[in-house]
Each structure stands twice: as C-alpha cells, then as structure tokens.
Amino acid sequence: MNAITDPSAALIETAARAAKAAAAELARAPRPAKDAALRAAAAALRATAPAILAANAEDLAAAPDLSAAFRDRLTLTRSRIEAMAAGLEEMAELPDPVGRVLSEWTRPNGLLIRRIAQPIGVIGMIFESRPNVAADAAGLCLKSGNAVILRGGRESLRSVAAIHAAMVAGLREAGLPEAAVQVAPTADRAFVGAMLRAAGLIDLIIPRGGKGLVTRVMEEARVPVLAHAEGLCHTYVHAAAEPEMARAILANAKMRRTGVCGATETLLIDAAIAPSLLPLLVADLRALGCDFRADARARAVCPELPAASEQDFATEWLDAILSIAVVDGVPAALDHIRRYGSEHTEAIVTADAAAAAEFLNGLASAVGLVNASTQFCDGGEFGFGAEIGIATGRLHARGPVGLEQLCTYRYHVLGTGQTRP
C-alpha cells in the first residue's frame, strides 16, 4: 500500500483500522456486556453532567451569532443530558438485534437456509450542531455491534468530546474495546472529506444535518450513504377534521421544537373549512410567536398574512415560520406534497377513515401519521430507544433508524451431506 501523505486521510486510516478491530470484537460480544456498557455510560453522563454543561457553555459562547433554532439544537440542559442517559438505559432493555433469525426455509434437497442479522461494521457519523446525537449514535452502534467514528460540527466540538468521554468510560467499565466509539480529533473540514473517501475502511456513512451537509456527502462519498434529506414536513387539515384536535396538533407539530427535522413546515387546509378554521389556527400559532407565508387562497381568508413565494413552499424553515396553502381535497394535498416535500413525514387530521387511508396510501414519504403531530417522527417515540437519524432514501432503511436498521444480514446454510448435481 502506498504511504498516505494527507494528514486527514492518515488520521482516518488509523481510526478506522482501530474501529474495524473493535467492530469484530463487538460483533461477538454477548448482550450482557453491551448492556453493561450502555448502563455504565448512562451513569457516566449523569456523573459528568457539570463538565458536559460547562463544555456546552463554551461552545455556545464561541458562536454568538447562531440563529435561535440553531442555538436550541446546540444547547444542552440537565434535562437533555438526562434524556440521553435514559435513552441509553432504554437501549439496554431492548432485545439484542444481532444474531436474529430473520427468516428460514428448507429447500427440496433438504438444505436449511437461514437469514441472520449481523452488524454493518464501521459507521461514520457526520452531524451538525446537535451534540446529543453523539450519545444516541454511540449507544445504538454499540448495541447493534457496530463501531462508530463521530464527527460533529465545529460548533459542538467541546460538547461532543465531553459526551464521548462518558461513552468511553462505559466501554472501559464493561471490558469492551474503547475504539468502538471514536470522535474526530479535529474540526477541519478535510477530515469529513477523508471520511467520505475511506472506502474499504468505513462501511456506511450517515449524515445528519442541513441540506448543505447532506448534499456534500451525497456528491463526494465513495462509501455507501444512509441519506437523510430535508425534513420538509406537512400537516394536512382535512375537511372532516375535528377543529380542536387540529388546533392542538398543528401547534405542537410546528412550535414544540421548531428546529427538529420532524417539525411541520407547511400547513395544508381544505378549502371547505378554511374560512372557519384557518383564522383560529393562525391566531393560535401567532400567539406562540410564529410567522407565516401564505398562498393567495389563504390570504383571501386571512388578508394580513404575508404572501408566499414558490420557494417558500420548498423551504425547510427550521424556525418559527409556517407556509400555508389551501387545497381541494386529498388528491390536491398529495399533489402539493409530491411537488414540494422531501419524503420525510406528513400528517393528516381527519375523522374520515377513508380519507386517512387515501392519504397514507398516496404518500411516498418515509412516515405518515393520522391525527398526530409530525414531531412523533422520532426513534424514541417509535420505541427504538433513540435514533441515529431519519432515513428518507428508498434503500435499506426508512424513517427513524434504530437498532434493527443498523444491521445487515448473512446466510447460514445447513446441510446433511448434499452435493450439487
């Protein structure tokens, strides 16, 4: 092999080779050892919470010009650290995904064929701003028998390092290889490029961040990518919606946390109920600090709303801004979603079961909901313990990516002396 002269490539090769060795050991690790590591890491997160919060305060102070939504994603609190720890403990209670018999069948010649779940290997996790991703990704990879190399955004460098230390403490206490969870030693963008070129060393790249990051990863990667596109999510209020339910769901879907990828960015409302219900929905959200961009039909009902441009409906706001369009029934709502959406998460609010079924069956998105907030698109809410991201591509995994989605499979073929004619 030629000598590596690129410093970032050299760093990745060293990290990835250590990760491969650790992954081989994790793949054979019994469930009790992995669960012990998760519980010990949870305890370490709680014990080092003051140090994690101090590191996070330094990150926040070093980036004073962040938007409110970005700052929210970057900020850690004691409750968020507790949520990370509880998520690790929840993962420990979940079944081990490795070694599951996914299916089995017997051929006419007597061969018994089994499809068995196994870890993917070495995961490269590239994410922006949200430091809790470090704990979620590390825990999910550990439990599923994968090693992970974490590369957080430069804004979260200190916070991620502090969280990483807690994860390593858990591995050490359980007697598992510390190289199973590694963190990028530099914030240099060249390190990301080296990760994307590390074919043969890294088995899967998972990007989690804004459109710019995901686009770069998709364009430059020489490693398979589990893609997470924008979270341009829609809530459709159907003509048969119960008004108070619609008001509660939309307020939560938009304003609970505006910076998460499951936040609703566009309200679609049926023309039949727009005159009576849209003013109430707008008033509810305006009281919560939301701004709006509305099409001509919505502005005919609420003239004070700012006009929406074509680009507004294609924008993932990640902020307290809501696009609004009035539509004529389920087919028109689906047409709008197909035109502007990112195939992430869509919701319908309706008491009409046939309309709900038509909506769900017409979606191409990874997640569709009926009478519930789009912010339920979350690995924890799905019972996965946590998630490593929301996959919006068409292959391997879709929606929240948890333990089972971090496994591939192999075949065991059991014979009794058969030979092929």
Image (cartoon, helix red, strand yellow):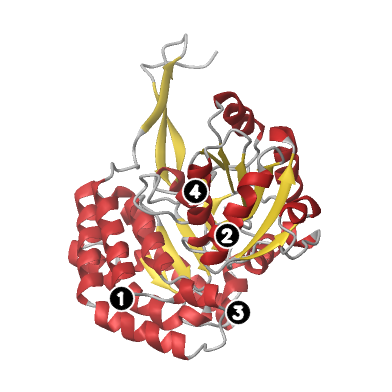
Which residue position holds label 3? 189
Q: Earlier in the sequence, mark 4 or mark 3?
A: 3
For marks 1 and 3, give the CA distance. 22 Å
**Quarter-of-image position of residue 197:** bottom right
The mark lying in front, picked from 1 and 4, is: 4
The mark lying in front, picked from 2 and 1, is: 2
**Quarter-of-image position of residue 83:** bottom left
Residue 340 in the image: x percent, y percent?
74, 51
The image shows residue 227, relative to residue 57, as above or below, that is above
The image shows residue 369, relative to residue 128, as above or below, that is above
Which residue position holds label 2? 283
Name of the residue lying farthest toward the front: 276
The mark lying in front, picked from 2 and 3, is: 2
* Disc 2 residue type (three-letter): Ala
The residue drawn where x is 60% and y is 79% is 189
Q: In this view, does 333 lie to the left or right of 388?
A: right
Residue 249 is tagged as: 4
Classify mark 1: helix, strand or loop.
Answer: helix
* Disc 3 residue type (three-letter): Arg
Q: Which of marks 2 and 4 is nearer the N terminus?
A: 4
* Disc 4 residue type (three-letter): Ile
Classify mark 4: helix, strand or loop.
Answer: helix
Please state, as top left, top right, bottom left or bottom right, where the C terminus lies in the image.
top right
Residue 57 in the image: x percent, y percent?
38, 86
Classify mark 3: helix, strand or loop.
Answer: helix
Residue 245 in the image: x percent, y percent?
48, 43
* Disc 1 residue type (three-letter): Ala
Do we see residue 228 in this rendering? no
Q: Do the residues labelled 2 and 3 touch (CB within 8 Å)?
A: no
